[in-house]
Image (cartoon, rainbow, N blue to C red):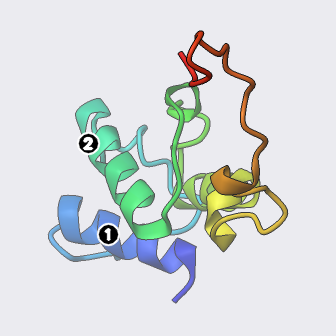
Amino acid sequence: MTPQKLITDYIADVWMDGDAEGLGPQTPIAELNIIDSAGVFDLVHFLQTEFRITVPLHEVSLENFRSVSAIAALVARLRNDDPRKDGPRKNLPRKDDLPKPDLPQDEGGSAA
């Protein structure tokens, strides 16, 4: 299922009694009062959970949440920017591979 379809279904289920009729990709969600400002944060939680992304607070804007299409574009952009989407990066050193710092020695020869 596409992100756009998942988002449409979620909005319809939560705020439209399960009826997605009239909710197209470009339907102005805020202008039609389909979702209020408090509901946007519920939608943000859904997006973060469903798509395993982080939506920074500065991205929670009317521009990004004006329509299903805009929300799907935001998800796509955040997924492309999120290094966690593909799991851990393979080229980063593991903690055990990093050099140990030189610690000052006490008189007995052990690290202080």
Asked which secondary structure carries label 1, the reply is: helix
In depth, the one of 97 and 107 nearer the eye is: 107
- Name the amino acid type tagged 1: Tyr
How many other residues sit within 10 Å of disc 2, few (<14), some (14-19) or many (≥20)? some
Determine which of the numbered discs, if any, sits on residue 10 in the image.
1
Q: Name the residue located 34 percent from the left edge and 58 percent from the top edge.
A: 46
Residue placed at 49% from the left, 67% from the top? 51
Q: Position of residue 89 (x, y in %)?
A: 74, 64
- For residue 48, above or below residue 106: below
Q: What is the secondary structure assignment of the residue under circle 2?
A: helix
Residue bearing the label numbered 2: 39
Question: Is residue 49 left or right of 58 when viewed as pictured?
Answer: left
Residue 96, compared with residue 9, is above or below; it is above
Disc with the residue nearer the chain's start (2 vs 1): 1
Q: Quadrant of residue 11?
A: bottom left
Mark pair 2, 1: CA separation: 12 Å
Q: Look at the picture and state if 58 lies above or below 85.
A: above
Q: Nearer the viewer, residue 91 or 59?
A: 91
For badge 2, the amino acid type reads: Gly
Most extreme residue toward the front, as rendered? 108
Q: Horizontal placement of 56 versus 79: left or right?
A: left
